Image (tube, helix red, strand yellow):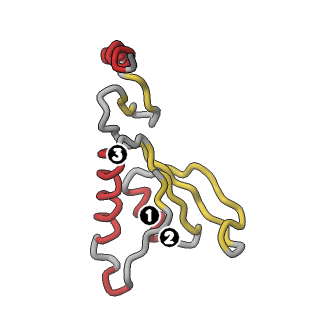
Amino acid sequence: MHVCSLAVLPAHQNSGVARRLMERLETVGQEKGCCKLFLHTAWAMKEAIQLYEKLGYMKEGYLREHFYGEDFMVFSKFIKSSTPYLRVQANHSCVLNQQNKRKVHSSRG
């Protein structure tokens, strides 16, 4: 799942709104069976970067001159999938749950 844009009105900044929005997006992603969330932000958005890192997002790379010539940073986070066949390991890789492997094959016919 890719988070395209997130903004909080100045009057509501520093009140936990962005954190709650991100947590809700993660929940929706889980409900939809997503394994990983992606987002990008301008490198100058220090507060946003701090929030994403506090929420467990990892830097994946950079987008050079991505938006009006400004460089952006790419972040991602593996989330637990709602499907019982996948699990997220501590090293952020999704793997097939071996004890459910037979169920995966039998459900495909």
Rounded to the nearest whole Å, what is the CA distance between mark 3 and mark 2? Answer: 30 Å
Q: Which residue is mark 2?
A: 46
In the image, residue 108 lies at what x, y percent?
A: 39, 20
The residue lying at 40 percent from left, 43 percent from top is 34
User: Circles 1 and 2: CB distance less than 8 Å?
Assistant: yes
| Image mark for residue 50 | 1
Quadrant in the picture for residue 62: bottom right
The residue lying at 71 percent from left, 73 percent from top is 69
**Other residues around mark 1 within 10 Å, as few (<14) / some (14–19) / many (≥20):** few
Q: Secondary structure at mark 3?
A: loop
In the image, residue 37 lies at what x, y percent?
A: 45, 50
The residue lying at 45 percent from left, 37 percent from top is 92
The residue lying at 36 percent from left, 49 percent from top is 29
Position of 60 with respect to 69 (left or right) is: left
Under mark 3, the amino acid is Lys
| Position of 97 relative to 44 (above/below) | above
Position of 58 with respect to 62 (left or right) is: left
In the image, residue 14 lies at what x, y percent?
A: 32, 76
Image quarter (top left, top right, bottom left or bottom right) of the C terminus: top left
Quadrant in the picture for residue 85: top left
| Sequence-first tag of 3 and 1 | 3
Under mark 2, the amino acid is Lys
Position of 94 with respect to 23 (left or right) is: right
Q: Which residue is mark 3?
A: 32
Select label 3 or label 2 by which is in front.
3
| Image mark for residue 3 | none
| Position of 66 relative to 99 (above/below) | below
Select label 3 or label 1 by which is in front.
3
- Outermost residue on the bottom side: it is 11
